[in-house]
Image (cartoon, rainbow, N blue to C red):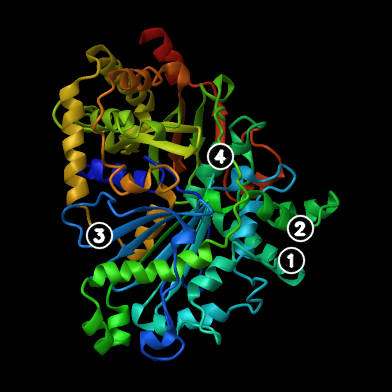
């Protein structure tokens, strides 16, 4: 991976709330459903016949018209903090071919009650199946599926994301019989979900089917292994996907009503002050609908588009109840000394060969202005002469290397170093780990250097200015997640910026990359035939036994060797 590509990858991942991730394993669900965002009118009457715009002042606590954007970015932005403390970023994009929106809730599977693993993911599924205001299932799905629309949602460790898009030219048809907008329907997910009894058991089957499919997904398997090896008293160890056994059979055995538990979970975790919304469209929607009126009355189409988006989004999303919940944090790390010092051999489904070293670290988001993770990633992932990668390639042991922090949830994360192994490299895992620690030691001895920090900062500025344009749905999804971590004004730039040089933070991070604070996993079908370790917990992971063994855990000779020779 080139230096520029490495920086770009870290920046893009950081925008979504994660600095770097070896494994992406949110509990995902794809479906086509209704869209959120854009003002549409029942008939094509002129705007003056529809009525005056709503006075938004009572709904808005703060407005930000100075959101930092790339000089090359043709989009315009407006940040809002609503009266109910919902954070919103509106986007006007004159070149987009899709309208898109995303709402992110600061609650994920770490919030699951211990007696009902998978409840957050199950809640994500159920929100699509009717609300008090709109109880009919699949109404939006039908509209969007015929008009270029789509939707997805996923449940991660500490947040759940709902997002969708639709062809802008069909927004004027996306109204109900009362002339209400798609945003009105979407907001009802977070205001009055039904969680009907009939849907509950049926959707458990959908979750169970998803789990069965996940068992054959290597990323998901690696993620579940990582969770299963963590402290069993920590929320991270829970079974995030859930299945029929955990959500229905076990629940009933414990005299728990799944529907009642869903309502309780939604009530205790879904609050406007824990939600962030990003919504965007192009500025020509109303011009297409009312060409004469628009050409006569609108001087700044992008500003007008932001005004229209605000008219559509603000009044309804301001109605989401603010329960003034405290954003959850997990300052205790799920990995301690007992969870480290192991080598794990993993049998993948696909033909993969890789070596993964992971170091427990705290959450680095509070230090985004100095970004010590980017500094260390820059050096460990460097490809130039004298770099770790160049030496390992010279020996013929690896084909690629990536390194960087992965922030799993607010409070904790990992610094990961991943090696794509060659066939020969599989026989030199101990040597590769040894060289990695020698390189880290060299970085410690040399100490932090401001000129290196400024070089990484300059790279970030270049990446921010000339970044590739993402698909609208991906863009709003990343932004709605990032809004949990960064101020509205800086939410676009924060993943790239690092104006503050703080050598003490760099040194502190480097001092966490030690032999006593590492776990090692080696992934290859070479290990086929080994059985699951006895460290694997409870039957939630029993389905992993369906294929060849997933992992075997044993004292690592590589780490023993390093402790005596390093």
- Left or right of 500? Residue 477 is right
Of labels 3 and 1, the one closer to you: 3
| Residue for badge 4 | 225
Please, is residue 518 above or below residue 491 in the view? Answer: above
- Seen at 41% across and 57% down, the residue is 477
* Residue 259, picture quadrant: bottom right
Q: Earlier in the sequence, mark 4 or mark 1?
A: 1
- Seen at 61% across and 57% down, the residue is 321
| Residue for badge 2 | 258
* Rendered location of residue 507, percent (x, y): 32, 18
Marks 1/2 in contact by CB < 8 Å: the verdict is yes
Q: Nearer the viewer, residue 132 or 296?
A: 296
For label 2, the crowd category at 10 Å Cα-Cα, with few meaning under 14, some 14 to 19 and many 20 or more, is many
* Rendered location of residue 108, percent (x, y): 57, 48
Please, is residue 99 above or below residue 233 in the view? Answer: below
| Residue for badge 1 | 201
For label 3, the crowd category at 10 Å Cα-Cα, with few meaning under 14, some 14 to 19 and many 20 or more, is few
> Callout 2: helix, strand or loop?
helix
* Rendered location of residue 496, percent (x, y): 26, 42
Q: Nearer the viewer, residue 68 or 201?
A: 68
Q: Earlier in the sequence, mark 3 or mark 1?
A: 1
- Left or right of 428? Residue 69 is left
Marks 4 and 1, how far apart at CA: 28 Å
Marks 1 and 2, how far apart at CA: 9 Å
Marks 3 and 1, how far apart at CA: 41 Å
Q: Which mark is residue 469?
A: 3
- Seen at 29% across and 74% down, the residue is 97
């Amino acid at each position: 991976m080139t230096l520029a590509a490495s920086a770009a990858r870290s920046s893009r991942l950081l925008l979504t709330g994660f600095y770097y991730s070896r494994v992406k394993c949110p509990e995902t669900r794809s479906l086509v459903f209704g869209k959120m965002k854009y003002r549409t009118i029942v008939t094509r009457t002129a705007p003056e016949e529809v009525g005056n715009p709503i006075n938004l002042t009572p709904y808005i606590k703060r407005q930000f018209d100075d959101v930092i954007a790339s000089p090359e970015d043709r989009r315009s932005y407006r940040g809002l903090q609503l009266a109910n403390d919902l954070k919103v970023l509106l986007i006007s994009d004159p070149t987009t071919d899709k309208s898109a929106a995303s709402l992110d809730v600061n609650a994920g599977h770490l919030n699951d009650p211990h007696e009902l693993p998978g409840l957050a993911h199950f809640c994500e599924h159920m929100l699509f199946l009717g609300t008090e205001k709109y109880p009919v299932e699949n109404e939006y799905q039908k509209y969007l599926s015929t008009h270029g629309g789509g939707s997805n949602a996923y449940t991660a460790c500490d947040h759940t994301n709902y997002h969708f898009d639709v062809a802008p030219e069909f927004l004027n048809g996306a109204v109900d019989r009362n002339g209400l907008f798609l945003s009105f329907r979407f907001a009802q997910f977070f205001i009055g979900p039904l969680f009907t009894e009939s849907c509950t058991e049926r959707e458990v089957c959908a979750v169970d089917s998803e789990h069965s499919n996940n068992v054959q997904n290597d990323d998901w398997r690696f993620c579940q292994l990582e969770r299963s090896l963590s402290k069993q008293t920590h929320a991270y160890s829970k079974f995030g996907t859930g299945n029929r056994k955990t959500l229905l059979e076990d629940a009933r055995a414990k005299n728990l009503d799944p529907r009642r538990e869903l309502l309780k979970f939604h009530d205790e975790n879904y609050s406007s002050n824990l939600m962030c919304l990003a919504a965007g469209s192009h500025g020509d929607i109303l011009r297409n609908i009312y060409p004469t009126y628009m050409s006569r009355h609108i001087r700044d189409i992008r500003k007008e588009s932001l005004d229209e988006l605000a008219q559509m989004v603000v009044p309804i999303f301001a109605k989401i109840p603010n329960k003034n919940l405290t954003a959850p944090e997990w300052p205790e790390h799920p990995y301690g000394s007992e969870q480290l010092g192991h080598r794990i051999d993993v049998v993948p489904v696909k033909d993969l060969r890789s070596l993964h070293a992971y170091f427990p670290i705290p959450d680095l988001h509070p230090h985004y202005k100095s970004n010590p993770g980017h500094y260390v990633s820059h050096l460990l992932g460097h490809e130039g002469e004298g770099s770790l990668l160049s030496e390992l390639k010279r020996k013929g042991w690896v084909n690629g290397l990536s390194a960087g922090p992965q922030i799993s949830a607010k409070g904790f994360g990992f610094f990961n170093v991943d090696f794509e192994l060659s066939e020969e490299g599989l026989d030199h895992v101990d040597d590769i780990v040894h060289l990695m620690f020698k390189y880290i030691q060299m970085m410690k001895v040399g100490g932090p250097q401001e000129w290196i920090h400024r070089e990484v900062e300059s790279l970030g500025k270049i990446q921010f200015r000339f970044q590739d344009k993402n698909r609208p749905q991906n863009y709003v999804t990343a932004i709605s997640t990032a809004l949990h971590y960064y101020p509205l004004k800086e939410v676009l730039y924060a993943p790239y910026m690092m104006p503050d040089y703080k050598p003490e933070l760099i040194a502190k991070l480097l001092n966490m990359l030690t032999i006593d604070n590492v776990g090692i996993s080696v992934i290859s079908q070479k290990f086929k035939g080994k059985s699951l370790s006895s460290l694997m917990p409870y039957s939630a992971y029993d389905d992993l036994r369906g294929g060849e063994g997933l992992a075997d855990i044993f004292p690592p000779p590589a780490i023993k060797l390093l402790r005596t020779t390093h």
